[in-house]
Image (tube, helix red, strand yellow):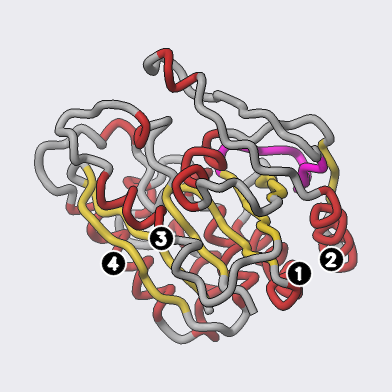
Amino acid sequence: MQPTFFIPHGGGPCFFMDWIPPDTWNHMRVFLSGLIANLDEKPREILLITAHWETPDITLSTNLAPNLLFDYYNFPPHTYELTWPAPGAPKLAERAAELLIKSGIETKFDQTRGFDHGVFVPMKLALPEADIPLAMMSLRQYLDPAHHLAAGAALAPLRAEGVLIIGSGLSYHNLAAFSADVENPEADKFDAWLTTTIEGPTDDRAKALAAWAAAPGARASHPREDHLAPIFVAAGAAQTDPGQRVYHEILMGNAVSAYRFG
C-alpha cells in the first residue's frame, strides 16, 4: 500500500539556479530528494495533482510522452533547458477516471499537456532517473475543498495498486510576503492549525479541512487556495490513515510544511 503526500514544489526553478542566500532552498531540496528513495516500496506509477493546472472539471493527462511546460517567467535562460523525460501514464489516467466517474465526479482527459513546473521541478529531485510513469491531475477551478476531498476518496483504491498519489503545491502561498525579514506570525498560526488537523483524529480531518478558510491565518497564508487544494486530494485518498508532518522550515520568513498520510 502506497502512502499519499502533500509536498512543496518551491518557487519556479529555484533548485536549479543561484539564489541569495545560496542555501535558501537546501532544506526543501533534501526533503524532496528523499521523497521516493525513502519509501518502503518503489511505486509502480505516480498520480500527481498539480497546483498549476486548473480546469472546469477534473482533468487527467493521457499524454504518453509529455514535454516540459516552462510556466514560469523571467528566470535565467538555462532554466528553460531543463529536462525530465519521465513517461506519461495514460492507463493510470483512465483507471483514475473510472474511479472518479463511478463516484459521480465529472472527469475529462487531456492528450497534449506537458509536465508543468509543479510536476517536473520537484520530481526532478525526487525521481532523477525519471523511470516511473506519471499522470497529472488538474484541480477543479472552483477549488471547492469538499469536491477535492471526495475526489481523493474515490482515488483511494489506486494506493493498493502500487500508485503513489502526490499533491504538489505549497502550504504557505502569499507571494507578497515571501521577502519578509522577520518570521510571519500569520504563517505560524496557519501552519500550526494545518499540522494539528493533519496529525489529529482522522474522523475529524475531512470536516476540518473543508472549513480551512476559517482557520487562524488562513487567508493571510492563502489569498487564493490553489496551492493548498492538492492537500485535499491527498487527504481524501488517505481515508482513515494517520497523517504526519514530514518536513518543516521557516522559508523567507514563512512557515512551510509537507505531510505524509499512511
Cβ atoms at labels 2 and 4 below 8 Å apart: no
Sooner in the amino-acid sequence: mark 2 or mark 4: 2
Residue type, numbered disc 1 = Ala
Residue type, numbered disc 2 = Leu
Residue labelled with disc 3: 34
Label 4: which secondary element: helix
Q: Nearer the viewer, mark 4 or mark 3?
A: 3
The label number, if any, that marks residue 154 in the structure image: 1
Q: Nearer the viewer, mark 2 or mark 4?
A: 2
Q: Which residues are magenta?
A: 51-62
Residue 88, position as x, y percentages in the image = 74, 44
Dominant secondary structure of the residues highlighted in magenta in the image: strand
Density class for disc 4 (Cα within 10 Å; few <14, some 14-19, many ≥20) is some
Q: CA distance from mark 2 to mark 4?
A: 33 Å
Density class for disc 3 (Cα within 10 Å; few <14, some 14-19, many ≥20) is few
The label number, if any, that marks residue 99 in the structure image: 2
Sooner in the amino-acid sequence: mark 2 or mark 1: 2
- Residue in view at x 85 percent, y 42 percent: 109
Residue 186, position as x, y percentages in the image = 24, 52
